[in-house]
Amino acid sequence: MRTPGMAVFKQQNVEDFYEMGEQLGSGQFAVVKRCKEKSSGTEFAAKFIKKRISRASRRGVKREEIEREVGILQQLQHPNIVALHDVYENRTDVVLIMELVSGGELFDFLAQKESLSEEEATQFIKQILDGVQYLHSKRIAHFDLKPENIMLLDRNASLPRIKLIDFGLAHQIEAGADFKNIFGTPEFVAPEIVNYEQLGLEADMWSIGVITYILLSGASPFLGDTKQETLGNISAVNYEFDEDFFSNTSELAKSFIRQLLEKDTRKRMAIEDALNHPWIKSSGHMEEESSQCVTQKNGEKLKRTSLNEHGVLSLSSTTQNKTLFQRFPLLWEDISLIQTGLSVSTDTSSFLQRDIEALLSTCDEKEAWCKETSESVQKLLSQTGCDFQTMKATRLLLLLEDVKNIDASLGSVRSDCSYRLEQLEALQQKLKSEQLFLNPAGARSSF
């Protein structure tokens, strides 16, 4: 098993070894196609990740980010995590040959069921926890756990197997390292991401809490009318167990969610504690099974909040949001590509639209973050009794006084310079007179 930093990309044409089929999905800088290995006939999924072609460009994924994703995937071998089979590279793309996960999204599967008992829910949550436990045992944080990234291997199985996908944002967490970032899907990110604080494995546990809440109710705990409102709800941990959705939900299930949706990362339930929680441990013999069922109404709500409502397409290699602020210059790159002979297609138009929407979305998030930071600073200034306006006025007065002093000094210097110039002119006249007196002939010849 290779370690991160040792990723090997085959410099061969992937289509010499795999026959490409229909497109399964697409993301910001990635397209996923069904493919078949020519030598064995085995079906896989080929994920084409667009490489960033130059340092000046912001289109595509940096090579080091692709290497990080591949390096992490090459460490992983678990029944609940998508497997990496091979990696190829050409001039424009890195192609990941992945295990084919064809059962669709978990939430789309559940939306077709008329009801979901807590026992069934815990069986799916348990599989998610098993996959995350394996990741966390290797100090790997996924950082993008959300419904779109929870897939089914085969939806026709009696108990479909969960597969966690898309490791584009995953990081190996080093002990003592300072790691902060703003990324992920707003609805599912932890408060420490919203507040740009130290990040660790705990962020995944928060996301599992949000997913569990949605799984049991069909409603999203923090979703607001705007992205700013959503992020504000997360930062304030503003949620409740609405009786319309949780009237038949057990207290054990609510306890499980509460311990995951804990703002203080030190108090938030860790993966081992989650697996040992009574709600998960008792999944095989619940005493109140008949009263612990999500009704058909909640199932319909789950349908309304499936793929499109939850945002980004699955299998995307989303770059860190900070780069989105620099995305407008990419339009000029598209013009350049058109001039070289590529025709403008519907796909390109939608691609650019997603770029602009992502930029605007990130600007909204940054605006909300700045607003919260500003409020925190104002509160801090109030607590310390620092009168910022008084200090500002005092500094301005001192600055004006300095300007006056400098102006006065400059006036004195000008006066002194004028006096010196007059003395110099007088001295020159005197020297000329002395010269004429001492050497009248030489003076005449010099003219």
Image (tube, helix red, strand yellow):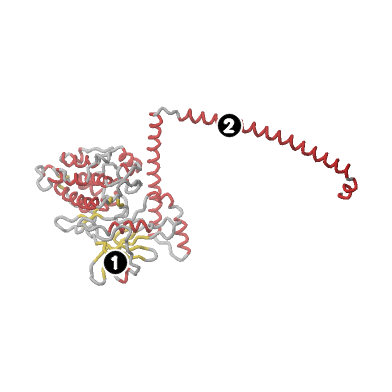
Residue 8 in which image quadrant: bottom left
Q: Amino acid at mark 2?
A: Asp
Q: Residue 32: percent from the left, percent from the top?
A: 31, 61
On screen, 177 above or below 11?
above
* Disc 2 element: helix
Residue drawn where x is 15% and y is 58% of the image: 157
Q: Earlier in the sequence, mark 1 or mark 2?
A: 1
Point 88% across, 48% down: residue = 442
State if disc 2 and disc 1 touch (CB < 8 Å): no
Q: Which residue was labeled with disc 1?
A: 21
* Front in this rendered view, residue 285 or 420: 420
The amino acid on which the numbered mark 1 sits, given as a three-letter code, is Gly
**Callout 1: helix, strand or loop?**
strand
Quarter of the figure with residue 193: top left
Residue 301 seen in the figure: no
Give the distance between the C-alpha atoms of the residues marked 1 and 2, in whole angstroms: 75 Å
Quarter of the image for the N terminus: give it. bottom left
Q: Residue at the location (33% across, 62% down)? A: 48
| Residue at image coords 40%, 55% | 352
Q: Position of residue 152 (x, y in %)?
A: 21, 56
Q: Is residue 272 left or right of residue 321?
A: left
Q: Which residue lies under the disc numbered 2?
A: 402
